[in-house]
Image (spheres, rainbow, N blue to C red):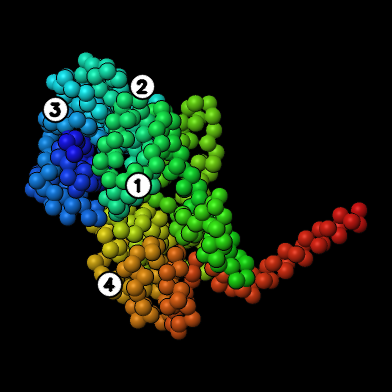
Amino acid sequence: MSTKFSVVGLGKLGASLAAVIADRGFKVIGVDTSKQAVNAVNGGHAPVAETDLEGTISRNAERINATGNHLEAVVGSEVTFVTVPTPSDEKGAFVLDYAIAAMQAIGTGLRHKNEYHLVVLVSTVLPGSSRNGLLPVLESASGKCHGEDFGFCYSPAFIALGEIIRNFKNPEFLLIGESDTRAGSRLEASYRDIIGTAPPCKRMTLENAELAKISINTFVTAKISFANMLSEICEQIPGGDVDVLSDVIGMDKRIGRSCLTGGLGFGGPCFPRDNAALAYFADAMGSRADLAETTDRFNRSIPERILQRPDLQISHGAKVAVLGLAYKPLSHWVEESQGLTLALGCTELGATVMAYDPLANETARQFVAGAVTVVDTIADCLAGAEIVLITTPDVAFTDLSVQDFNTGAEEVTIVDFWRILKGKLSGQPGIRYVAVGRSTDDDANQARLQNLELSRRQAAAAITDR
């Protein structure tokens, strides 16, 4: 229990990691260029909004210290985690500017140390970035050699915003890309101390680990898109129900049920850009990533196809309520949110749009620039609404009842993308309930199937007649 840690970057990921380390009884030094973030942590407060972060930092305030001085952090610790942003450029590649600056500052700190030090990059990067872009910076700034004087690992986190602390404490597995065996062993031992359990640990080269990170996210998004494709198909068959289909498909151990629930498309700060990154990297290396490109294209087309649904028909002047602006429940993030995209799309069709989210209202207001009215209560959002779009399966929406939808309109159309209220709203007077992913007109769908079979028979007969 003597290891001392430092974390460079006190955003959602870095601050949560520092809090988890401290919660396990270790001393940790947080580093950030933002004085506001440093002051918040030193005052026992969360520098950013994230589930359980405020309480975890508060109860471990004596073990967490923050500074803007990288030298102080490196000299005062044995293992440094780097969680700085790696934003995407216009081609889809990850920009290393922040990571390079961090490595330069860490390298300067290493000059003042005689003891072995481990540097761990957590931020997502493309294959080759660690060995060819960041390790040389560390060696140049420190005047030392990796493997002898310090170790380097790439170990990305597999977390979900809103659940970062829980994910850090209960990882399904650990991924370690190591510059050498000593570095990988040191990090694996540190993880055992921090986590307190021994989840499966996969150790490999830096390049394999870098590719594994974006590959996992890309595969997950392909699975999500497959479920959304099935959702549209299920609406076209009598009795069609995507949840029934997903349940049976998910029983196959080769597939699994996780991430197979049809709904809206994926968003957020990671999934969309990892598809673009893999496609960029494959092309740059003379290969192809058609599946990643197709997944991204299909996902981005979902809001437009929704707005063209014949059972929605948003007319000019219609009053639309959007419940859910974050890209997922329990999140403040609206980046790549399809709920937000739908809200803006409704305004382009001439509708008056009111919107509400349990956590993301303030963030959303910055994005919509007044085009959508973001309100502070569900009641204000639903008042007078003729059409309601439920875009996230947030608990605040699953608890709604029929009475909540007495909006004042003669009839209200409720489009429930996650089918969270099907047991409460189906068949209710004054409500036209559309559960996306389920058949809403079995007679028409049966007629469509009969016509398809008739066409098949006619085509077969025509071939026989020849």
> Mark 2 and mark 1: span between their CA atoms?
29 Å
The residue positioned 53% from the left and 36% from the top of the image is: 289
Residue tagged 3: 75
> Can you give x and y, in whole percent of width and height, for residue 274 in the image?
42, 40
> Can you give x and y, in whole percent of width and height, for residue 196 in the image?
27, 45
> Mark 4 and mark 1: span between their CA atoms?
40 Å
The image quadrant that residue 207 belongs to is top left
From this view, report whether residue 277 is shown above or below residue 439. Answer: above
Under mark 1, the amino acid is Pro
- Would residue 101 be visible to someone looking at this image? no
Under mark 4, the amino acid is Asp
> Mark 3 and mark 2: span between their CA atoms?
25 Å
- Would residue 433 be visible to someone looking at this image? yes
Q: Neighbour class for label 2 at 10 Å: few (<14), some, many (≥20)?
A: few
From this view, report whether residue 242 is shown above or below residue 202. Answer: below
Residue tagged 2: 132
Circles 2, 4 touching at the beta carbon (< 8 Å): no
Residue tagged 1: 171
The residue positioned 53% from the left and 57% from the top of the image is: 250
> Sequence order check: which comes first, mark 4 or mark 3?
3
Q: Neighbour class for label 1 at 10 Å: few (<14), some, many (≥20)?
A: some
In the rendered structure, the answer to whether residue 169 lies left or right of residue 30 reads right
Tag 4 secondary structure: helix
Under mark 3, the amino acid is Val
Tag 1 secondary structure: loop
> Sequence order check: which comes first, mark 2 or mark 1?
2
The residue positioned 34% from the left and 59% from the top of the image is: 329
